[in-house]
Image: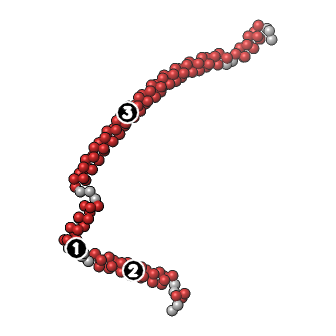
Amino acid sequence: MMLAELTGLEIGSIITGFVFGAIGLLIAGVSAFRKQDVKLDQPVNITITEELHKVFAGKDVFDKHVAENSARHAELFSRIGAAAGGAENKISAEVTQIHARINLLDKSNSRLEATTELQNEKLNIMDDKLDGMPERIIATLKNTGAI
């Protein structure tokens, strides 16, 4: 049977078989690699340690470095704390000023609302008085004989 004569399902089955086979081989390879024990003789470890001491600092130098870093970090955190505290106080003062401005605007707005309400009431009274005025004027003129 030729590859061109296979259906999509048959090709999918073949590909799936290859994928699962490759996964199985990969798992078997990893398992075999993990089972290998690598043992080094003690002199190798000592040699490595001595070489590391030549390249890197000894414990006393490292401890000195740790102490210097700790002091520097304490200084930096102190500065950060002072800056944060100063910023917090500044922001708090600005927020207080903004609240004071808002309260003034609120009072001003309340006065404007009261004035507008009073003016609206007066306009309503004037409107009520003007309602029917032309009819009253005409009636008065008719009664007096002016028309």
Within-10-Å neighbours for mark 3: few <14, some 14–19, many 20+? few
* Percent of width and height locating residue 3: 52, 88
Estimate the spatial distance between the alpha carbons at disc 1 and disc 3, rounded to whole Å.
59 Å
- In the rendered image of this protein, does residue 4 appear above or below residue 59? below
**Quarter assignment of residue 125:** top right
Q: Nearer the viewer, mark 1 or mark 3?
A: 1
Q: In the structure shown, which secondary structural element does the residue marked by tag 2 occupy?
A: helix
Q: In the structure shown, which secondary structural element does the residue marked by tag 3 occupy?
A: helix
Identify which residue is drawn at 31% across, 39% down: 78
Residue that extends furthest to the front in the rendered view of this protein: 54
- In the rendered image of this protein, does residue 49 appear above or below residue 142? below
* Residue that numbered label 1 is attached to: 40
Within-10-Å neighbours for mark 2: few <14, some 14–19, many 20+? few
Amino acid bearing label 1: Leu
Q: In terms of depth relative to the viewer, which is nearer, 110 or 127? A: 110
- In the rendered image of this protein, does residue 119 appear above or below residue 3? above
Amino acid bearing label 3: Gly
Amino acid bearing label 2: Ala
Q: Say whether disc 3 or disc 2 marks the residue closer to the N-terminus.
A: 2
Q: Is residue 101 visible?
A: yes
* Residue that numbered label 3 is attached to: 86
* Residue that numbered label 2 is attached to: 22
**Quarter assignment of residue 87:** top left
Residue that extends furthest to the right in the rendered view of this protein: 147
In the displayed structure image, the side of residue 33 where residue 109 appears, left or right:
right
In the displayed structure image, the side of residue 142 where residue 69 appears, left or right:
left
Q: Nearer the viewer, mark 3 or mark 2?
A: 3
Identify which residue is drawn at 72% across, 16% down: 134
In the displayed structure image, the side of residue 49 where residue 85 appears, left or right:
right
Q: Say whether disc 1 or disc 3 marks the residue closer to the N-terminus.
A: 1
Identify which residue is drawn at 37% across, 37% down: 84
Q: Say whether disc 2 or disc 1 marks the residue closer to the N-terminus.
A: 2
